[in-house]
Image (cartoon, rainbow, N blue to C red):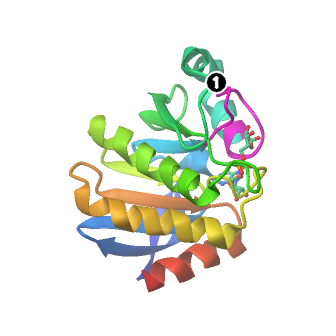
Amino acid sequence: MIKNIPVKNQEVSVMEKILSGVKIECLRGDIASQEDIEAIVNAANAQLRIGGGVAGAIHRAAGPGLEEECLPLAPIKPGEAVITGAHNLPNRYVIHCLGPVYGFDKPEDKLLADCYRNALKLAEENRIESVAFPSISSGAFGYPVKEAAKVALGTITETIPGLSHVSKIRFVLFSEEDLKVHEDILSNV
Ligand code: AR6
């Protein structure tokens, strides 16, 4: 189902599907501007420092306190996730995941699936109700977006029957093409 929701006072078109009582949404936007979401997920680097892409957008919006909180938690390995506060972001938490570098960290599909599983595990442990993910690894880390989306949505579909706190999972895609890829896969789940 496609409907319009307000994000930052603008109407945004969002595809949604309910699976095992959990609402899964796909929309085009900026992960650092998801005001109605409790935890956003960072496509982090191993050192949990400000970087480019998602990590740059999140750290810039959060302010330097986020990097200070992150430093004692670093380094993390591909597939791992850690949780911090959200500082100046409009959310309560940031869950930082290190995705695999495509063609280098192997097996990349398992490591990418681990990111989604571990992020949702942390969300459950912290009684978080809504989580927004970017497309982890599909930028600087080179994972083809369609393959990454299959792993992401497949892992989430497998994981949601065991969730008791998370009731909304949002994919925030940066480009219209990436949004279409996710919508196509979600409509076939
Ligand atoms: N909101 C939503 N999606 C975004 C945003 C944004 N603000 N910015 C980029 N994307 P990437 P990775 C999309 O490179 O591949 C960093 O430098 C982007 O188009 O952020 O896991 C870190 O420091 C792509 O589809 O993450 C790491 O070193 C997706 O988000 C490294 O890059 C992921 O792109 C992590 O690489």
Bounds of the magenta segment: 43-56
Whether residue 37 is visible here, answered yes or no, is no
Q: Residues within 10 Å of mark 1 (few under 14, many from 20)?
A: some
- Is residue 59 placed above or below 162 in the rendered structure? above
Task: State whether label 1 is within 8 Å of ligand 1.
Answer: no
User: Which of the pair 147/139 is nearer the observer?
Assistant: 147
| Apparent side of residue 96 relative to residue 145 in the rendered image (left or right) | left
Residue 130 visible here:
yes
Q: Is residue 125 magenta?
A: no
- In the image, residue 128 lies at what x, y percent? 31, 42
Question: So how many labels did they put on this image?
Answer: 1
Circle 1 SS class: loop
Given residues 139 and 100, the one toward you in this image is 100
- Which percent across, then down, holds residue 79? 55, 44
Out of 173 and 153, give the one closest to the viewer: 153
Q: Residue at x 43, y 42 (%)?
A: 39
Q: Tell me the quadrant of the picture where the N terminus can be found.
A: bottom left
At a point 65% along the width and 19% down the height, the residue shown is 64
Where 54 sits versus 65, above or below?
A: below
Q: Is residue 27 above or below residue 127?
A: below
Q: Residue at horizontal 62%, vertical 24%?
A: 75
Majority secondary structure of magenta residues = loop
Amino acid type assigned to the residue bearing label 1 in the image = Gly
The residue positioned 39% from the left and 42% from the top of the image is 38
Image quadrant in which you'd find residue 145:
bottom right
Screen quadrant of the C terminus: bottom left
In percent of width and height, residue 36 lies at 42, 49
Q: Which residue is mark 1?
A: 63
Locate residue 182, reporting x and y percent.
57, 73
Res 77 → quadrant: top right
